[in-house]
Image (cartoon, rainbow, N blue to C red):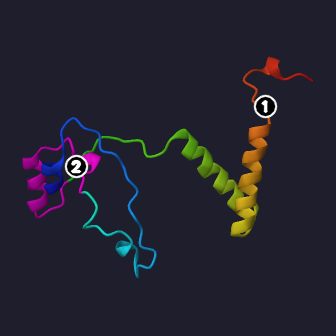
Amino acid sequence: MKARKEAKPGTVRVFKVPTLNFEAEDYTSMIDWRKEPITEPPVTMKIDDETLLRFIHEDVTPIVGFSRYPCHTQAVERHIKLVTEASVAVCGKESRDGFIRVRLESQAKMPKFETKIQHKI
C-alpha cells in the first residue's frame, strides 16, 4: 500500500541495478532494502485498494486471476535451449561455457537462409 502512495501516475519507473553486498551472510542481506525505492508489483496495479485490503485481511487465501505477462522473450527461450543442449553434451562449467561460445560463434559466421532458393549447391 505504501508503494501505491509513492508512485507517480503517468511515469515510467527506471530500473536501476542495486548495489550488492557480496560479503553478506545470506542472500536477503545482499541488498540494503532501506536504501532502495519501494515499487508496486505490476500484477497488483490493476487491483483497487479496497479489494487488495480485503485480500490481505481474509482468513482464507483468495484465488485471484492476474493478467498474463510474458516472462521470456524468444531470445531468452533460444538461449535456454542452447544451455540445455550444452548441459546434455558436455560435463563441467568450463566445457559448457566453451560449448555455448563455440555454438554462438558458429551461428554468427554461418549465413542465414530464409528460402530454399538461397541454398546453392
- Residue 12 position, x and y percent, is 29, 39
Q: Is residue 39 magenta?
A: yes
> In the structure shown, which secondary structural element does the residue marked by tag 2 occupy?
loop
- Residue at 39%, 72% (x, y): give it: 30
The amino acid on which the numbered mark 1 sits, given as a three-letter code, is Pro
- Residue 36 position, x and y percent, is 28, 61
**Camera-nearest label, 1 or 2:** 1
- Residue at 50%, 41% (x, y): give it: 73
Above or below, 57 relative to 25: above
Q: How many marks?
A: 2
Q: Quadrant of residue 58?
A: bottom left
- Residue placed farthest to the right in the image? 121
- Residue at 73%, 53% (x, y): give it: 101
Above or below, 96 relative to 29: above
Q: Earlier in the sequence, mark 1 or mark 2?
A: 2
> In the structure shown, which secondary structural element does the residue marked by tag 1 occupy?
loop
- Residue 3 position, x and y percent, is 18, 53
Look at mark 1 in the image and give the residue it sits on: 111
- Residue placed farthest to the top in the image? 117
Report whether 49 appears left or right of 41. left
Q: Magenta residues?
A: 38-62
